[in-house]
Image (spheres, helix red, strand yellow):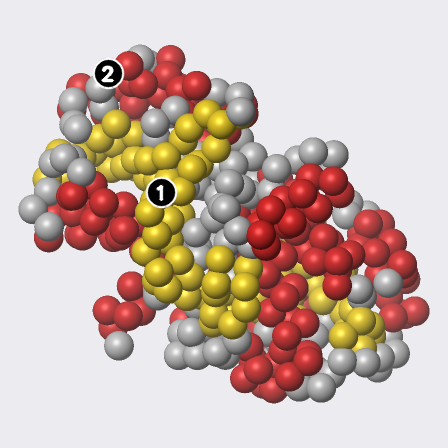
């Protein structure tokens, strides 16, 4: 246990050189590839902390094998992600790869996973089609259609008739825009304008001016984890928080670990998502307490939970295979797996290898002086609707 934890700790930043010491058959190396630097570094930090907490709590051995987490930083660059995946499989004999902070990074590894027959556990990226790119991909994060369609259903029932959508212009943003807009229009709502901002170093101000000019009932927002506070600050600077235009979206924009930084402009935002740090279950209370304790008071967000659950998935699969690490056997063992996550009950859809989970409707409120996404309604066991629509 100590060795694995030390190894994981060391590996953040510098890459551990001692792989030879772990080459024996009793050790299962898991490669965790994350953006620890660059624009998506908050995702890397949360995911690393989530995976390490699981290891600490459950011990670094399962089904007679020792578990070693090898953490590598791809800086958010897809060519680096791919090279690291190849090295982890080729040099470190990794039996599973995990992480992938952004959709293009997860996609870059799909052909590597297929060729090597090694499970690729996507614990962050959330564009719906990712799991279709390799039969070795399993996902513990979420999909944007899964989170966005319920937001449209809620809006239709709650006096919102005219909406402007505002998304980051790449896979997950385009999914969010489509699944919110299609569901909302089918139910009789009107989408006045669809605005897209670039992924890299966005200046939200000119786009927000357009939202203000359109004067909709609400603006539906998707920006990737980490960009929510820049977005919300400019939202407030433009006076949109006081304009009567409601802020709705998937929970990525009101990210739990950014809410304190965003401050009062976030109050009242209604979002749909699969995890809130305020989720009132005993499992989540224990998770949040342990996570904060291990990370200097840092709040876990949905990225941390997905990495924690990625580890739970691997441990569960190794138990089922009695320690066998053959990729096909591991994937079979993962299909249909179910467990209680800090987010609530979850399972892996055996058909699509995507996660089935509750989606919660939440509102940002102040509780004991701190801002939280307070859940007030639950849609149970939601499957990714993108794949459900095709089957
Ligand atoms: C993605 O790139 O797929 C992604 C990243 C951050 C999110 C959601 C999706 O919050």
The residue identified by callout 1 is 376
Q: Residue at x 40, y 42 (%)?
A: 375
Real-space Cα separation, disc 2 to disc 1, in angstroms: 25 Å
Disc with the residue nearer the chain's start (2 vs 1): 2
- Give the percent coordinates (x, y) of residue 201: 48, 30
Closer-to-camera residue (319/230): 319
- Callout 2: helix, strand or loop? loop
Residue 294 location, quadrant: top right
Where 19 falls versus 151 (above or below)? below
The residue identified by callout 2 is 243
Q: What is the tally of numbered marks visible in this picture?
A: 2
> With 384 as the anchor, is 101 left or right in this view?
right
- Give the percent coordinates (x, y) of residue 371: 49, 27
Q: Residue at x 59, y 61 (%)?
A: 309
Residue 246 location, quadrant: top left
> With 244 as the anchor, is 141 left or right in this view?
right
Residue 169 location, quadrant: top left
């Amino acid at each position: 246990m100590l060795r694995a934890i030390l190894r994981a700790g060391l590996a953040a930043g510098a890459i551990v050189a001692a792989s030879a010491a772990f080459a024996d058959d009793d050790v299962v190396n898991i490669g965790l590839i994350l953006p620890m630097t660059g624009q998506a570094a908050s995702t890397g930090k949360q995911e690393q902390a989530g995976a390490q907490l699981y290891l600490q709590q459950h011990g670094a051995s399962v089904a007679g094998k020792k578990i070693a987490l090898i953490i590598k930083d791809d800086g958010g660059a897809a060519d680096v992600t791919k090279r690291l995946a190849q090295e982890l499989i080729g040099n470190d004999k990794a039996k599973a790869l995990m992480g992938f902070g952004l959709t293009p990074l997860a996609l870059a590894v799909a052909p590597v996973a297929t060729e090597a027959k090694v499970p690729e556990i996507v614990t962050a990226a959330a564009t719906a089609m990712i799991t279709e790119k390799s039969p070795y991909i399993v996902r513990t994060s979420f999909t944007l259609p899964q989170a966005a369609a319920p937001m449209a259903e809620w809006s239709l029932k709650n006096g919102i008739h005219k909406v402007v959508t505002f998304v980051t212009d790449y896979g997950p943003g385009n999914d969010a825009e489509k699944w919110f807009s299609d569901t909302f229009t089918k139910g009789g709502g009107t989408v006045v304008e669809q605005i897209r901002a670039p992924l890299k170093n966005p200046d939200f101000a000119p786009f927000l001016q357009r939202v203000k000019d359109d004067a909709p009932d609400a603006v539906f927002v998707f920006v990737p984890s980490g960009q929510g506070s820049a977005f919300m600050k400019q939202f407030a600077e433009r006076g949109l928080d006081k304009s009567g235009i409601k802020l709705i979206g998937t929970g990525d924009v009101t990210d739990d670990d950014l809410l304190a930084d965003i401050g009062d402009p976030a109050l009242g935002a209604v979002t749909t998502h699969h995890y809130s740090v305020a989720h009132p279950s005993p499992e989540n209370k224990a998770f949040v307490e342990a996570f904060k304790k291990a990370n200097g008071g840092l709040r876990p967000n949905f990225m941390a939970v997905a990495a924690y659950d990625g580890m739970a998935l691997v441990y569960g699969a190794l138990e089922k295979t009695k320690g066998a690490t053959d990729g096909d056997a591991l994937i079979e063992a993962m299909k249909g797996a179910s467990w209680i996550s800090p987010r609530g009950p979850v399972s892996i859809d055996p058909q699509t290898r995507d996660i089935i989970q509750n989606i919660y409707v939440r509102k940002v409120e102040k509780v004991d002086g701190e801002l939280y996404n307070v859940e007030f309604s639950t849609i149970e066991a939601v499957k990714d609707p993108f794949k459900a629509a095709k089957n």
